[in-house]
Amino acid sequence: MQIFDSFLLEAVINGILLGGILALLALGLNLIFGVIDVVWICYAELIMIGMYSVYYAHNVYHWPLALAFLACVLLVAALGALLHVLVIRPVLGAEPINQLLVTGGVLFFLQAVATLAFGVEFKNVGVSLPALQIAGMYISFARLIAFGVALGGMVALYLFLKRTYIGTAIRAISQDRGIMPLMGVSPNRIFVLTSAIGGALAGLAACLLVLQYDIHPAIGLSFGPITFMVCVLGGLGNMVGGFIAAFIFAQFISVGGYFLALEWGYVLAFLFFIGMMFWRPQGILGGK
Amino acid sequence: MRSFGIRICALAAVLGAAAFASSAFAEKEIKIGVIYDYTGPLAAGGSKAAAIATKIAIDMINEKGGVDGYKIVPIYADAQSKVDVAINEATRLMDEQHVDMLMGFYSSAECVPIAQKADAQKLFTWYNVCIASSVFKGKNLQYVFRAQLHSDQIGKAACTFVKEIAQPKLHKAVKDLRVAIIHEDGPYGSGVAAGNVEACGADGMDIVLKEGYSATAPDLSSLITKLRRARPDVILHTGYNPDITLFWRQAREQGLKWDALIGQGAGYGQYDKLHASFGDEANYIFDVDPVAAQLLDAKTLKPGLGDLTQEMITRYKAATGEKEVPPHASMGFNQAWIFFTDVLPRAIKKYGGITSDDLRKAALDTDIPVGGTIQGYGVKFFPPGTPMSGQNERSSPVVMQYLGGQTKIVWPAALRTADPVIPLPKSSAYAK
């Protein structure tokens, strides 16, 4: 077997595209942690709710797909804000473990609500995008879009945080939560806004995942743990770190799975993660 | 004062006698812990269908007054598609609810540890759906029984079918046939794949790839790239539902082609779900499974079983509102029906009750000939001391194919209701 061939290159490209999905997933989670110092363990379940919203808007109520996507982003943004107001705000001063447990509780709550409300059957929006065929390689168009949106989302968020007044306030709060109220900034409003933006990013991820995966109440199990590990690997709260970690992680899965059995790709990725936790427990680029 | 005391004693005596009489004439019960995955990803992969059908069987038996004076009292429990939850629920039912036996179970990953636990506690357990051979193989279980077929049989049936169609349909000698075996890596998928390797290998086929993956893996693109490189003619796939649809979607995006894809149970038994995901591309998929009872010619079965199947189908459709009745419904109903109409009456009449030992002895006496159940196969259990002790030795699978929105039997020849369409027609996006 020739080692360097088009199949290997295809595996590398697929790894990059998978990295795009993981990077988008990690973006919102890192933003929330970076600003509010709380890990939303239930982040993937918000994405699941978003995927259901696209399905019902498009397939049941026959909204155009673009409108269904817009509604999904707005809905999950609202859910993010609501999550902060109802669940996070009361435990903001509590121990981190309590904050973790309360969002873990929301995870099970959302799974149970989805099971009761939508049933256990798998839903599918039925949209199939073509693949690009280049030099004998096949590249998923849906994943290419996800990759582009992840890059665009990263740049847009960066510009928003750097170039706007609200973005500056968000960064300031993340650096010193105590001093900002003295300068007339309301941390509560900034936290709600940040949660809504984090939710909107989850909604955006839902729009892209719905093109590639069936929807069911347990879909979060496929992404939740990996997303969390990507965030930790990059440095919790560090959006650039999370972005880089997503691509490293994805290459282990894709190329590792190409040379060895698929499961070994995950084993190698987790081994790398464990090793990094010993070597750089603060993550590749450190925390926020 | 003395007379008041006498009156109180008399009243107590009357009440005590009434209570005794009431308990003596009370309906006897057999309390059964019924465990399935009602939620989580396995629910839609066939577990819920099997659970509904098992409940239909229990309801039908109770409507007839139970079994020889015993009312069936089911306690339904949800394993949530998690092995640890299944074990916890089984433990709760055994130790707190003190059930007389356990029944049900969809996932082989749950069946393996619970078989060991139930056997150690000498609690009679009757598996309805899970198929991994490893549940029984070499374990010498005494109190666990399964009328359902086992994974080695599925693995072998798939290879025998491929061997038989190699020359007439694919115009290739068996030794030139390139076969890939992919599977979810739990006991179910691994068990079927092991059966594939053994049988296809023995037939001299060229196994170009064999690989397992986690059913919850978010990405299978590496596996598909390797399959493209290996260029198989036939892919033997064992998986649940989310991984199957992910595989098909990514296979299409990555240009994977095949002459035949042969699914082996679980998610591939859910034609309506496959059709909902892939539309007409779900046509021509093969599925190796215990047969869906409604596909069999009732004339080949014991008189009355055709009507029983129809009753099950009617009730299942009424309960679910679905048009398609998957093989899992037949599995859930058939195994339960075999227990309630064959094993339990014998335990009560011949062995005097419903203790685990009574039920065990009655199960070991089971001798149902082929054609004696709604799924066609007979039932006789391998006795203790044999490698598959507790497993039905008369079970058998069929190969089905989805053709024009209908499920047809294409193997074995004796049960065939349609000629297999292979290789895949050029109209399919997956055709070579």
Image (cartoon, coloured by chain):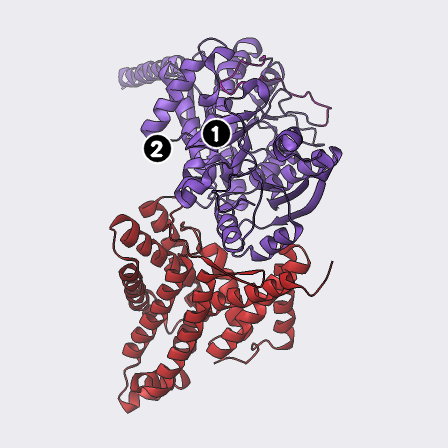
Chain colours: A red, B purple
Look at label 2 and name its amino acid.
Answer: Glu
Is B333 contained in the magenta span?
no
Look at label 1 and name its amino acid.
Answer: Pro
Q: Could you tell me residue B427's position as x and y percent? A: 47, 42
Q: Residue furthest bottom?
A: A183
- Mark 1 nearby-residue class (10 Å; few <14, some 14–19, many ≥20): many
Q: Callout 2: helix, strand or loop?
A: loop
Q: Could you tell me residue A80's position as x and y percent? A: 32, 66
Q: Is residue B133 visible?
A: yes
Asked if both marks, 1 and 2, belong to the same chain, the answer given is yes
Q: Residue at (54%, 16%) from the top-left corner?
A: B343
Compared to residue B130, the image places residue A55 above or below, namely below
Compared to residue B333, the image places residue B47 above or below, namely below
Nearest to N terminus: mark 1 or mark 2: 2
- Mark 2 nearby-residue class (10 Å; few <14, some 14–19, many ≥20): few
Between A258 and B330, the residue placed more toward the observer is A258
Label disc, if present, on residue B322 of the rendered structure:
2
Boundaries of the magenta span: B369-387
Count of numbered circles in the view:
2
